[in-house]
Image (cartoon, rainbow, N blue to C red):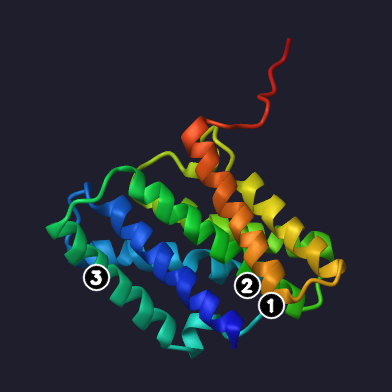
Amino acid sequence: MLLYYFDLAGVAVFSASGVLAARDRDLDLLGVIVVAVMTAIGGGTLRDLLLDRHPIFWVTDSWYLIVIIASALLTVAYVRRWPPPVATLLVADALGLGLFALSGAQFAEAAQCPPLIVVLMGTMTGVFGGILRDVITAQIPLILRREIYATAAILGISLYLALQALGVPPAGAFGAGMSLVVALRLLAIRWGLNLPVFRQS
């Protein structure tokens, strides 16, 4: 049940990030909601397709779409009254990345995937919605920018698995892993941290 609520929190945060990305793109309200929905369900849909989980999570549980649309409308109302700083999108994306990466990893665990696949599934769950959002709003996807992004998800999920192997309860391991993802992402934004760039000499 806790995983379900984390998943709802993830779609709410990613929905808000979709609205923030679409705010300067001259879209009508329906267009903004479409961006929010695709941002919020993109990663989870890819996860379910790859894990052969049918029907897709949001098809059988309308609460996902209700939460996504409610989050989008509340974000639109808030932004119209109090325009947030530009960095708000990056912070919202970091939170969504952390929530979705770890919840995606837990779904892969429930499907009894090996650790490497758990890491891959969690990472794809975390990054794919943001890729869709950025492509639709004609921006360079965050995953393609130099600051650490997918690497943060990989390290956070790896910490989550390592802590569980050491006997830490799943809830505690989840919190630690998610915190690492968010912290690494925010530090990367603040200090411009990135992996070494490959160049042919």
Give SS at disc 3.
helix
Q: Mark 1 = which residue?
A: 52
Above or below, comparing residue 92 to residue 174 in the picture: above
Q: Do labels 2 and 1 touch, CB within 8 Å? A: yes
Label 1 Cα neighbours within 10 Å, binned few <14 / some 14-19 / many ≥20 = few
Question: Residue 55 versus residue 79: which sits nearer the camera?
Answer: 79
User: How many angstroms separate mark 3 from mark 2 (CA)?
Assistant: 30 Å
Choose mark 3 or mark 2, whichever is in front: 3
**Picture coordinates of residue 170 (x, y %)?**
73, 75
Amino acid type of the residue tagged 2 in the rendering: Leu
Element marked by disc 2 = helix
Q: Is residue 18 visible?
A: yes
- Residue 155: x percent and y percent? 71, 51
Q: Is residue 151 left or right of 99 when viewed as pictured? A: right
Disc 1 on helix, strand or loop?
A: loop
Residue on which the image places disc 3: 74
Residue 147: name its quadrant.
Answer: top right
User: Which-is-in-front pick, marks 3 and 1?
Assistant: 3
Earlier sequence position, callout 3 versus callout 2: 2
Residue 143 placement: quadrant: top right
- Residue 135 visible in the snapshot: no
Find residue 87 and report its horizontal and vertical position in percent.
35, 44
Mark 2 sits on what residue? 49
* Residue at image location 51% in from the left, 35% down from the top: 145
